[in-house]
Image (cartoon, rainbow, N blue to C red):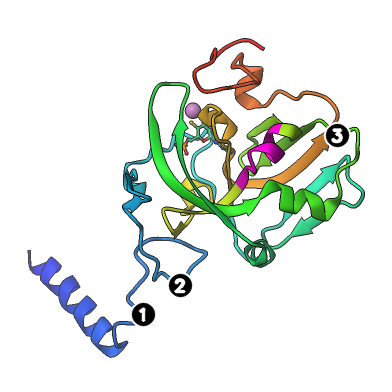
Amino acid sequence: MKRWNLVFTCLLVLSAVSGCTTVPDTTNTPGTSGNETEIKVYEGIKLTPISEQRNNAIAGTQYIDRDTYRLRITGLVDTPVEFTYEQLLTYPNVSKIDRLNCVEGWSFIAKWTGVPVKTLLDEAGVKENATNVIFYSSDGYSTSLELDYLLEKNIILAYKLNDITLPPDRGFPLQLVAEDKYGYKYAKWVTDIEITDEPYKGYWERAGYSNKADVGGPAFGD
Ligand SMILES: Nc1nc2c(c(=O)[nH]1)N[C@H]1C(S)=C(S)[C@@H](COP(=O)(O)O)O[C@H]1N2
Ligand SMILES: [Mo]
């Protein structure tokens, strides 16, 4: 009881001294100054609070350094390119409301904001014979999607979730928002994108999960 009073007093003093502008960052979001506010409703739809979203990634939370981070694009491109985190933020962004459906049966709905994959691929220049795009993550995870799907749906790599910079456990700095696909296509902590001319099976796909992964479609096979 006493200890909480002390903590509370310290916080009060701190916010008084700082004029309430630099309240300590308790949200653990490395990409920000800590003054973002999570939204609860978007376009009339109630969002799932970040605190209620699950995290059962294959190797636990990845902690990626904002300053040394690079997103690379290689494979069937005219010029391999890489982006810093700051550069990614300079492109026009897109926001979407989308439900992530894990194949295990749980789901959550969120507002995602980020840069369209197409914007980044255009910087590299995709070769004519390209058909598939592989996403690699810092935990050794990977998955792939068809190029046409990514372009037609204007799929984004999100850096914000419910208006908050992605926290480490949500995939900082980038999570792929693979609309209408099962959750295992939503690669978190993406570091590399490779363009190919053949289908590729990622971590869960190799274990037997569907490479198509359409929500409502079969979970296993092809
Ligand atoms: N890098 C990486 N991305 C990943 C995963 C993972 O283990 N590693 N898990 C996938 C799965 S199975 C789901 S359902 C979604 C959402 O899982 P989360 O709750 O762990 O974010 O992230 C996907 N992206
Ligand atoms: Mo999942």
Which residue is at 68% across, 33% downward? Answer: 149
Relative to 172, residue 18 above or below:
below
Relative to 136, residue 184 above or below:
above
Can you tell which mark lies on residue 22? 1
Cα gap from disc 1 to disc 2, whole angstroms: 8 Å
Cα gap from disc 2 to disc 3, whole angstroms: 40 Å
User: Which is more N-terminal, label 3 or label 2?
Assistant: 2
- Discs 1, 2 touching: Cβ within 8 Å: yes
Magenta-colored stretch includes residue 155: yes
Where's residue 169, x and y in %? 46, 47
The residue singled out by tag 3 in the image is 130
- Discs 3, 1 touching: Cβ within 8 Å: no
Amino acid at the residue labelled 2? Ser
Q: Which residues are magenta?
A: 149-156
Q: Secondary structure at mark 3?
A: loop
Amino acid at the residue labelled 3? Ala
Count of labels shown?
A: 3
Magenta-colored stretch includes residue 50: no
